[in-house]
Image (tube, grey):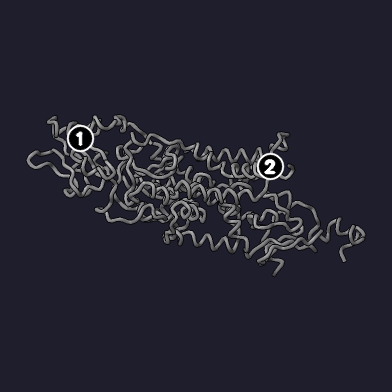
Amino acid sequence: MMKRRNFLQKTIFGIGVLGFSSLPFGLSRLLYPKANAALSNYSTLPGALADPKAFIEACIGCGLCGEICPPKCILFHKNDGGAESNTPYIHPAVKACTLCGYCMEVCPTEALTVTPIREVDMGVAQIDRAACYPWVDKGICGACVAVCPLGDKAIVYDFGNFYRPVVKDGCVGCGQCVEVCPEPSLPIRIVQGTDSKVARHGVGLNQQYKWQHDDRRLKY
Amino acid sequence: MNKLIIKVQRHLNKLRWGVLSLVFSMLILLPFLHLYQTFEAAHAYDLLSPSEKSISDTMEWLSKPFVKDPEVDLNNLKGTTWSGTLFGLKLSDPLALVGQISAGKTVYMPFLITALIPIILSIIFGRFFCGWICPATLIYELNDNLATWLRKAGIPVGKKKLDFRLKYLVLLMGIIISAATGMIAFAAVYPPALIGREIYYAIALSGFGSGMVFFLLTLLFDLMVTRRGFCRYVCPGGALYSLLGHFRLFRIKRDVTLCNDCAKCNVVCQFGLDPLRDDFTQECNNCTACIAVCPTDALSFTVSIKDIPNQGAGHLGHEYKRLHNIQDDQGPK
């Protein structure tokens, strides 16, 4: 009887010690609640590992990519994100990547690897033809085509429909077009994942996605 | 010559405070320099707000003697103590390497090489990072001074003693949690990583993140539970550095013939060690405060791979004299 009580006491003590030693990790999880990331149109960094899970495993959260970014477009999940806490992201509607490549060079881990500009895969731009000004004959614009750093490999005017932009295969998803687009509802956006190529010429996407109309007013 | 070396060691603590302040001030300066770089890269000085203009002007004045092209040259000095680049030399914390390996279950050679220099230095010098570089140490030591003032003012401060082996368990749990969840759990609890990151968030990204809340909680833990409690009992990085420095070359040795048992070293040791009876073990963070405070220069660094065993009472102290029946007015035989 005595022995069993001793054993029980030791077990409870062991569990208590283990619980105490994992307390800081649990506490830090509580401080970074999981945000509703599906609503916000964040994109990954240039040269990032394609699998988001592998990216979280590799990223040590040092913030070097953000500290070296010349346009300061790289933001961090500083008080949200759950497992993604302190990992970087880009919010192209606020500030878009200029594809300078400093972040890929400076990253100490596998999370960002040096990639040629045309092989970067941050997603693909997608134009909502039901909202874009030239596509609905509300005027002429062409801002996205003018600003694109990759030129006619990535975005061109539609054949015979001048000023109507069409995304091509060369798009790497840097998001310069999203930043420059004057339409408040942002008819152009960066889409990630395997189905992005299929959805490229979608029409009436407003019904499918909940668009954040106040993206531009966000300050970071 | 030997005496001179011992005399010089008394000033190591001042040098340490200089290094700590330098590291901390660099952590504050680098985000401002990055802001200046972004303003330069945008080529839009006229569009800046007045406060941004003042930042730009100050940083231009500070960096002008050292750099030609701020957009490129300032990239030579980036990062925090968690991971950073110094003129092309990438350095990372060994704990970051441990976290990455346990989370990703892969070894990425370029990253391993960045952590190699800190690992080798820790094997030689032991837990020197904790005492000499860690930006959180500066705040924790100031916090400890605050605790002293509070105690003087009559406000009770925590003085509990826990088991120092707890932090090795925290390291182990961190490795297990990292491996199970696939995220690097250490990044959110390791104070040097937190501090560097949060200072950058506060200056460049307008406001502290949640990590600062965690850091303030550790400060409260130090005040209310035990002196320097986080470093001694919880910090996983401290555990890793202690393990790496188990066979370190440089240890503090007490010269028994000079020791007078005044016990000032025990009072000043924030890690709660026992320099008075040669009990340093791998927990010592080489802060050299005991060397600086010793009135008879009895403590000094020596080259030794093993811990120095207890040498008993100091020859100038009362206890030794009582044991050997020496009269008080005479010196030791």
**Residue B299, percent from left and from top:** 72, 60
Q: Where B242 falls versus A192 (above or below)?
A: below
**Quadrant assignment for the N terminus of chain B:** bottom right
Q: Residues within 10 Å of mark 2 (few under 14, many from 20)?
A: few
For the residue pair B228 and B199, the one nearer the viewer reads as B228
Asked which secondary structure carries label 1, the reply is loop
The amino acid sitting under disc 1 is Asp
Disc on res. A9: 2
Label count reads 2
Residue B4 numbered mark, or none: none
Query: Hey, what amino acid is under mark 2?
Result: Gln
- Quadrant in the rendering for residue A135: top left
Residues A72 and A49: in front is: A49
Residue under label 1, please give it: A128
The residue positioned farthest toward the left in the image shown: A160
Residue at horizontal 49%, vertical 37%?
A31
Mark 1: give few (<14), some (14-19) or many (20+) Cα within 10 Å: many
Whichever of labels 2 and 1 marks the residue nearer the N terminus, that label is 2
Q: Looking at the picture, how far across and down is residue B250, in whole percent?
A: 64, 64
Q: Residue furthest front?
A: A1
Alpha-carbon distance for marks 2 and 1? 65 Å
Q: Is residue A34 left or right of residue B43?
A: right
- The chain ID associated with circle 1 is A
Residue A56 visible in the displayed image: yes
Frontmost of labels 2 and 1 is: 2
Q: Position of residue B255 (x, y in %)?
A: 76, 63
* In the displayed structure image, the side of residue B219 where residue B35 appears, left or right: left
* Chain bearing mark 2: A
